[in-house]
Image (spheres, rainbow, N blue to C red):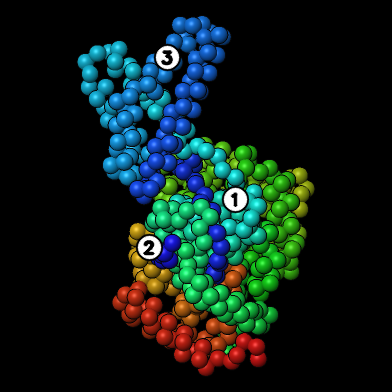
Amino acid sequence: MKQRILRGIPAAPGISIGKAFLFDTKEMSQVVKRPILEEDIPSEVRRFKEALNKTRHELTKIKDKISREIGAEHGEIFSAHLLVLEDSMFIDEVITKVKKERLVVEYVFQDVLKKYVKAFSKIDDEYLRERISDINDVGRRIIKNLLGARQPSLGELKEQVVVIAYDLSPSHTASMHKRSVIAFATDIGGRTSHTAIMAKSLEIPAVVGLEEATLFIKNGEPVIVDGNKGIVIIYPTQETIKSYELQKKGFEEYERSLLGFRDLPSQTLDGHKVRIMANIELPEEIPSIIYHGAQGIGLYRTEYFYMNRTDLPKEDEQYEAYKVVAQKIAPLSVTIRTMDLGGDKFLSHLEVPHEMNPFLGWRAIRFCLARPDIFKVQLRAILRASVHGKLKMMYPMISGLEELKQANVILNEAKEELRKKGIPFDENIEVGAMIEIPSAAMTSDLLTKEADFFSIGTNDLIQYSIAVDRVNEKIAYLYEPTHPGVLRLIKSVIENGHKAGVWVGLCGEMAGEPELALILLGFGLDEFSMSSVTIPEVKRIIRATTLQQAKEIAEKALTLSTGKEIEEFARTKLKEILSNASDPKT
Ligand code: PEP
Ligand code: MG
């Protein structure tokens, strides 16, 4: 086979060389229009016939059961369903279209089904029109059977593989074990999707937004995933493998050399101190963040607690988990973010309706304010854990003062309930607001009345201010942290916070991007919180400059007109500064 290179978006750094494992997530999602190769046509047709057989078998079983238990005349309803399965014209049309259009069979099937339903709905005969629901029912069953073959969960894999998928949800990624999943690559997704963030946290090299990886890569094929450049190579030549083995070694050595900064203070050459913290999704990440030299946890994304399970976590269970995190990181601090469900993080058991625009929808603090019963359970657990270490908390997706006030009212109720029961908590716990919606950034002067600190969530702030979906690979080129609009917002939040004596952190992926560290430092950011792998490098940069130099760079950046210009300028300045810096090992 010939070597083939696919280009996507770098999601998590590192290089892995291994065997592909095609993980099909289609059973979780809707039918997707996906092309197939000519050689895949027979297997698509076979899949269709198997799904028809399975559906026939299911319907016959139901018919027999109903006939036995309720009566033959009721069972007959399913004869009409079974007849749909025998309609050779319908079946042949699907097969012919799969061959002709070279698309996955479930998509073609759904298309043909829609055509039949439309035709039936126009017939002037009530009996026939009523058959539409039979056709739809059978159609749903067939699609379910086409999509539904269950696969092993990603946590159950026995051998080391490179996972290739159309898409992976953050909860799929959370269930990966670093030992068995050595890298992954997906057709869709963006750099700051939670799937990408989770990959970084688990230190699994990943590339997303490849568009056609699942089309070209087959199970068991040799692949290289280059998470630094966003490249996947199928059937690499011996030469490519050798070159990548060297690159991998070089990258790992570079990472190790940066660890020389791990235990050094994060301060500029003229003594200005900032905090370099880590973001975590799971408590299991704590050893890794300590290893990378985090000075605490600036963002603990608690929503993962609610995922990959069928019930809501109880107060005691949450309390125990937060307590362990607080104790393990003490005397350093941890900022617990209240649950941020929605967007690309769903919970099947919460019955949140499917929305047209989930990132703009009923999510995060909006959901919590509507369901204070669920919210308060978490608040009490956080408060109770606050006596076991240095704990802070913050709310996600605050859009304005009203919401922040409402959240604080519920928090005060939770505090009062604990006081009444004589349960101790830290009465001085710091409570912050995430600034990730443009309206919150623009009213941050007002928000200082109700917040002890701000944490700028640039992953969302960028998506909302540029109107660019953070998980959509097609518009990833627009997703620019250096967009002058984004930088102006960040600067104003920091200034507004400081005017009112409120410290300001930043916990989006931007905090860990080396090129941007100087600008953020120059704006006066107090705390950088990031995926732990990027901590040593950012610390190195902070230690290589003076605050004055950083301020000048930030000021100059703001005079430039486009994201590209600013990025280029920041990169050049970074090179200049690092070329004068001392060696990590000295
Ligand atoms: C952010 O939006 O920048 C953020 C840190 O929150 P999340 O990535 O979980 O949305
Ligand atoms: Mg966010």
Name the amino acid, label 2: Ala
* Residue 248: percent from left, percent from top: 56, 74
Q: Residue at x 62, y 39 (%)?
A: 310
Direction right: furthest residue:
422
Q: Is mark 2 within 8 Å of ligand 1?
A: no
Please say whether residue 59 is visible from this viewpoint: yes
Task: Tell me the quadrant of the picture where the C terminus can be found.
Answer: bottom right
Please say whether residue 413 is visible from this viewpoint: no
Front-lying residue, 49 or 372 = 49
Q: Residue at x 31, y 27 (%)?
A: 90
What is the secondary structure assignment of the residue under circle 2?
helix
- Label 3 neighbour load within 10 Å: few <14, some 14-19, many 20+: some
Q: Which residue is mark 2?
A: 476
| Image: 140 above or below 403 | above
Q: Which mark is residue 37?
A: none
Task: Tell me the quadrant of the picture where the N terminus can be found.
Answer: bottom left
Q: Which residue is mark 1?
A: 154
N-term mark: 2 or 1: 1
Front-lying residue, 409 or 425 = 425
Q: Which mark is residue 79?
A: 3
Q: CA distance from mark 3 to mark 1?
A: 40 Å
Name the amino acid, label 1: Leu
Residue 52 position by quadrant: top left
Tell me whether circle 3 and circle 1 mark residues in contact (CB < 8 Å): no
Query: Is residue 367 found left or right of 374 in the rendered image?
Result: left
Q: Residue at x 65, y 52 (%)?
A: 158
